[in-house]
Image (cartoon, rainbow, N blue to C red):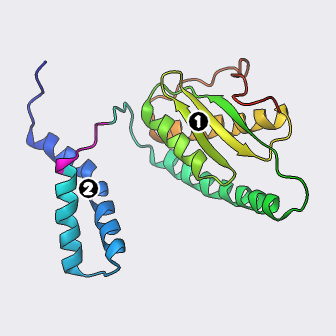
Amino acid sequence: MTKPARTPARALTEAAWQLPLLLWLVAVWMLLWGTFSIANAVNGLILAILVTRLFPLPPVPHVGRLHPWGATVLMGRFLWDLIPATLQVAAHALRPGPPVRSAVIAVQMRSPDDLPLTLTAEMVSLTPGSAIVEMDREARVLYVHVLGLSDRADADAVRDDIRALEDRVLRAVARNPPPRPARAGHPPLAAEEI
């Protein structure tokens, strides 16, 4: 199979997608050196271009587009959700008594695309009190370690919260979000029953 011809418009589009990565690498370079100067930025840019050319990232297939309003709602709600999650983890850490119960739960995702699945997993991991233990890409299942679960109702509430997060991610980056499935048929808990 032959590769499609590289047109100037396509090269410009690829360069535009690489720009945030290059800027991030330059920022990391400057932070590592601890000196913010033009020479340091130029050296970082040269190194960033060299790294991205020698070690290119594989393309992430994604059929969709960025929806500004959906992205705004996603980020606003994510930042808002960080407040109670942080307070809950702080309360668990400061409360005397027995250790906090936790569990690993399986959450079935509905997006067939890798980008929304990855974004959802990253946002779950960034939330205090939860971490992705494993992601089954073929089955579209996230295995999430969650603090403070005491029964199956708590686990179901966390699953519903993660599915709502996935819905917001899909509204932000998917072309046509699929319809929300019925609530029946949760995968079993990945760890011991709570």
Q: Amino acid at mark 2?
A: Leu
Instruction: Judge depth for marks 1 and 2 and give the one in front.
Output: 2
- Give the labeled residue for mark 1: 167
Q: Position of residue 54 (x, y in %)?
A: 17, 48
Q: Secondary structure at mark 1?
A: helix
Residue 24 within the magenta-colored segment of the rendering: no
Q: Please state which of residues 138 and 74 is positioned toward the viewer in this rendering.
A: 138
**What quarter of the picture does the C terminus occupy?**
top right
Q: Amino acid at mark 1?
A: Asp
CA separation in Å, label 1 and label 2: 28 Å
The structure residue drawn at horizontal position 55% and vertical position 53%, both measured from the top left corner, is 75
**What quarter of the picture does the N terminus occupy?**
top left
* 193 relative position to 74: left or right: right
Q: Which residues are magenta?
A: 53-59
The structure residue drawn at horizontal position 21% and vertical position 54%, both measured from the top left corner, is 51
The structure residue drawn at horizontal position 56% and vertical position 35%, both measured from the top left corner, is 134
Q: Main secondary structure of the magenta part?
A: loop
120 is higher (above) or lower (below) than 33:
above
Circle 1 crowding by C-alpha within 10 Å: few under 14, some 14–19, many from 20: many
83 is higher (above) or lower (below) than 137:
below
* 118 relative position to 22: left or right: right
* 117 relative position to 18: left or right: right
The disc at residue 83 is: none
Q: Position of residue 6 (x, y in %)?
A: 9, 36
The disc at residue 19 is: 2
